[in-house]
Amino acid sequence: MDDPRHREAEALLANQGSRQRTECVVAGILAAKQSGHMERLVRQAVRDELKSLQYQPPKTLPEETAGETQLTDLPDSLIHALDEI
């Protein structure tokens, strides 16, 4: 087995008695089923919430605010950086 998870699971299972192995496998299968069911429920709840949201675009676009930067807002080292090259 190349997968470390498989090796770990095999070691854990090998350390169980035969009746405990059966119970361990059954518990694992039921836990996986419950986990899958919970995932579906959460996905459905998120999907329903997203459907009810109303998107409100921002009042100013990022391009507009970027153009409003003044030279006085920039550090002197950045303003004169090209002069030094």
Image (cartoon, helix red, strand yellow):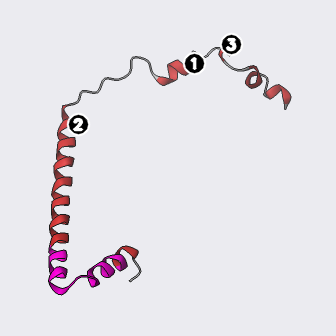
Quarter of the view holding residue 84? top right
Quarter of the view holding residue 3? bottom left
Of pointers 2 and 3, the one earlier in the residue sequence: 2
Q: Is residue 74 left or right of residue 18?
A: right
Per the image, the residue denoted by label 2 is 50
Q: Nearer the viewer, residue 39 or 27?
A: 27
Question: Is residue 13 found inside the magenta-colored segment of the image?
Answer: yes
Q: In the image, which residues are magenta? A: 7-26
In the image, is residue 70 above or below residue 47?
A: above
User: Which amino acid type corresponds to the residue marked 1 in the rendered image?
Assistant: Gly
Per the image, the residue denoted by label 3 is 72
Q: Nearer the viewer, residue 10 or 85?
A: 10
Q: Nearer the viewer, residue 65 or 29?
A: 29
> What secondary structure do most residues of the magenta stretch adopt?
helix
The residue at the point 18 percent across, 86 percent down is: 18
The residue at the point 36 percent across, 73 percent down is: 5
Q: Quadrant of the N terminus?
A: bottom left
Per the image, the residue denoted by label 1 is 67
Q: Residue 85, percent across and down? A: 84, 32
Q: Is residue 40 left or right of residue 60?
A: left
Of pointers 1 and 3, the one earlier in the residue sequence: 1
Eye-nearest disc, 2 or 1? 2
Task: Bin the neighbour count of mark 2 within 10 Å (Cα to Cα): few under 14, some 14-19, many 20 and up.
Answer: few
Q: Residue 14, percent across and down? A: 28, 84
Quarter of the view holding residue 68? top right
